[in-house]
Amino acid sequence: MADRGCPLEAVPLPTEVRESLAELELELSEGDITQKGYEKKRAKLLARYIPLIQGVDLSLQADSRTTGPSQTAAATPKQPKSRPTNSRDERFCSDVHTEAVQAALAKYKERKVPMPSKRRSALVHSSVDTYTPPDTSSASEDEGSLWRPGRLTSTPLQSRPSVEPWLDRVIQGSSTSSSASSTSSHPGGRPATVPSAASALTGLAAHAHIDLHPAPPDVTTGLGLGEHLHCERPQVASVRGVPRGCSGSILETADGVPVSSRVSSKIQQLLNTLKRPKRPPLKEFFVDDFEELLEVQQPDPNQPKPEGSQMVMLKGEPLAVGTPWPPSLLAALQQWGTTQPKAPCLTALDTTGKAIYTLTYGKLWSRSLKLAYTLLNKLTSKNEPLLKPGDRVALVFPNSDPVMFMVAFYGCLLAELIPVPIEVPLTRKDAGSQQVGFLLGSCGVVLALTTDACQKGLPKAQTGEVVTFKGWPPLTWLVVDGKHLAKPPKDWHPQAQDAGDGTAYIEYKTSKEGSTVGITVSHASLLAHCRALTQACGYSEAETLTNVLDFKRDAGLWHGVLTSVMNRMHVISVPYALMKVNPLSWIQKVCTYKARAALVKSRDMHWSLLAQRGQRDISLSSLRMLIVADGANPWSISSCDAFLNVFQSRGLRPEVICPCASSSEALTVAVRRPPDLGGPPPRKAILSMSGLSYGVIRVDTEEKLAVLTVQDVGQVMPGANVCVVKVEGTPYLCKTDEVGEICVSSSATGTAYYGLLGITKSVFETVPLTAGGSPVSDRPFTRTGLLGFIGPDNLVFIVGKLDGLMAVGVRRHSADDVVATALAVEPMKFVYRG
């Protein structure tokens, strides 16, 4: 407004007139009104105030005229000047308002009042600190650097304290205004609409003075501010069109030649756009506020670090020599089936706890032979045998039918087929079974064995056949009940099968991401594992074992289906459905059958504690081993302790409880042994949770809350070597007070992930290294996925699993610790499922 030739600061204009003038200014700067229309409307608004304006003394004009708008303009007085967006033509400029400005400056100097700052844009309210650089189409880096606060600290303006507050406000206003201009021209920014800008100017125009600011003094002339405060022709800061750092005195064109600032903002913007590279530097894509988040967290210098010596490889006891082991598991089955045909092998219970069927070793042998003959000779596809030795076969059996599963498993082994036990699919589109279907497809499975009752429960297509489940390969379903099997001729015998390197069975495992892989176990590994379990658990012929676990996989399969047959044991299989109805059922069967061993999980012990009140005739004195299959979980110790406290008065001896550790890849890793089998006394470790989060073992006191109490899982298996390696990176040996991943070298482990050569090499063929880089052993190790350490008496302690590891910054936390902490507070109030 002041460029029009009238010093409006000297005239007390009403608020509504100033608002109208501000709107006119905005319309003209935006190009919504012509110059002529602007002058006409402005003259009409100021008509009644013209006498007041003309009454100002005009004698002060000559002095300020000598300072000129800029050095460039003074050097080329005859050059035609283009009119910038934020200033009007020279013809409409009056020197009267310049004198008024000089007078106002002197007046403010006498009052010692800080100078009014340039008006701030209403579009962007931000300070220099939080200012985001404009887009590439707005201003060049050279121009933007003129108004950076760091550059202004060395200007001669510092020598005038009375100017400093005004300068600070000018810097802030300039940054804000330039930020607003860049925002309005930014393609992705918020559009600067005329109404919002007009309303902002209207509100700001309501002050007593329209805020003006002169351009910064030209420091190249060598003139300081000691004698004169150079007062340029005042400029109104328009909302858009002024690139960041443009002061109205000197601009640079694309050629680098200084020109007068009186060029239109759009031309200047075009010049700046052409001057900048097409692609901005990479750093401009990131906002400064996120720089702290992108920084890598530095380790705490005070964090605990392992201080012990490097651990050495731990060797398990050798397998017993001279024991009359059978040459293979099938040889043991044939021996017991022909010499002890009436010896009980497996007893199945119904949901009421009654024994519905007892499978003898003679029946197991004869039925398995029938199934093997049928699989090899009675199944055809296009007049060719459907199966040949080495093919994979799916076993689909419910948890309530261990008898038919056992017949199917050994029938496949006799036929030299590879069983793949899986869960019964519940629905056609069950998400979990889709991953199992992927496993079956990768294994090339074409046949599924099941029972008559199970097949009737499967979803059917309109043709009456079992539907093809989502993600599954097309399967042929065979019911293995007796009436569907063909009796082999008397001269037919299965191939004599020694324990070789061929695959015996494939066990599925679901990772934490939900993917399912198949772990192959060879005949040699199966036999070695059965021998090691027999020696570690002290199994003897005709012993009775109560099994509560799933007999299709893990410890339930290893103890209840494989090792039991090798030793002619009698297994009482307790179905999961019965445990839900009667949690004490397994204890009752121990009493009824005088079982010498029981195979449970900590959840089964926990449930029986809740149901034991009021039960009298319960005795556990016959037990010599209570094997806790999930004893490696940190929360199992609370169940073991509570169970012992309650049932010690009913014949349970403390040394009977035997936690063990296992994984699908390494099978059984360690098991606690009773003293009569040469095991050391059980131990507990009270560890600092803070130390564990850094992977360091620090013994603490039980009174503290931030501690984790774990129990040992016994000694390593016979014939196995064990070491602990670092969780990440190269598998270097850990120190004695450091948590790492347990690795096992043994003939009794899994051999591969079926069909997955890459991860097989990293898991089943690990070579642990000493600190010097030399291999620990000439044999490869298998990673177990268990995190722990070796404690006193060479006992193994497990503090978590690799699948449940949560890394937060440089610290590691275990999902199992959360459960263990909750159960430690009040274990009896938590009903959990493991």
Image (cartoon, rainbow, N blue to C red):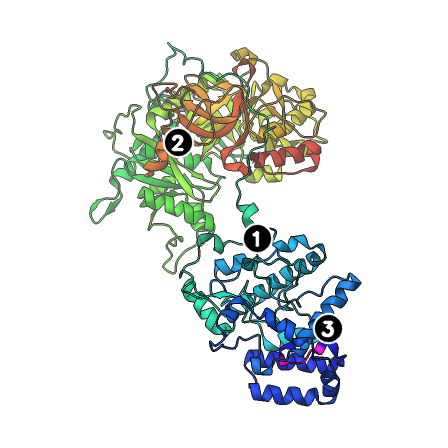
Q: Mark 2 points at which residue?
A: 763
| Mark 1 or mark 2, whichever is nearer to me | 1
Amino acid beneath label 3? His
Tell whether label 1 touches label 3 (CB within 8 Å). Answer: no
Residue displayed at 58% across by 71% down = 68
Magenta: main secondary structure: loop
Label 3, label 2: how far apart the Cα atoms are: 79 Å
Magenta span has 561?
Answer: no
Q: Residue 209 carries which label?
A: 3
Kind of element beneath mark 1 = helix
Residue 611 in view in this figure: no
Q: Where is residue 779 in the image (x, y as percent from the top left)?
A: 35, 21
Which amino acid, by three-letter code, is at mark 2? Val
Quadrant of residue 585 within the rendered picture: top right
Looking at marks 1 and 2 on the same chain, the residue that comes earlier in the sequence is marked by 1
* Span shown in magenta: 4-8
User: Closest to the observer: 39 or 777?
Assistant: 39
Residue identifier under label 1: 151
- Crowding at dot 3, Cα within 10 Å, few <14 / some 14-19 / many 20+, comes out as some
Q: Nearer the viewer, residue 602 or 493?
A: 602
Quarter of the figure that contains the C terminus: top right
Label 1: few (<14), some (14–19) or many (≥20) C-alpha neighbours in 10 Å = few
| SS type, badge 2 | helix
Q: Where is residue 271 in the image (x, y as percent from the top left)?
A: 44, 68
Identify the residue shown where x is 42% and y is 19%.
720
Q: Position of residue 292 (x, y in %)?
A: 57, 46
What's the CA distance linking mark 3 and mark 1?
30 Å
Amino acid type assigned to the residue bearing label 1 in the image: Arg
- Could you tell me which residue is drawn at 43 percent across and 44 percent down? 515
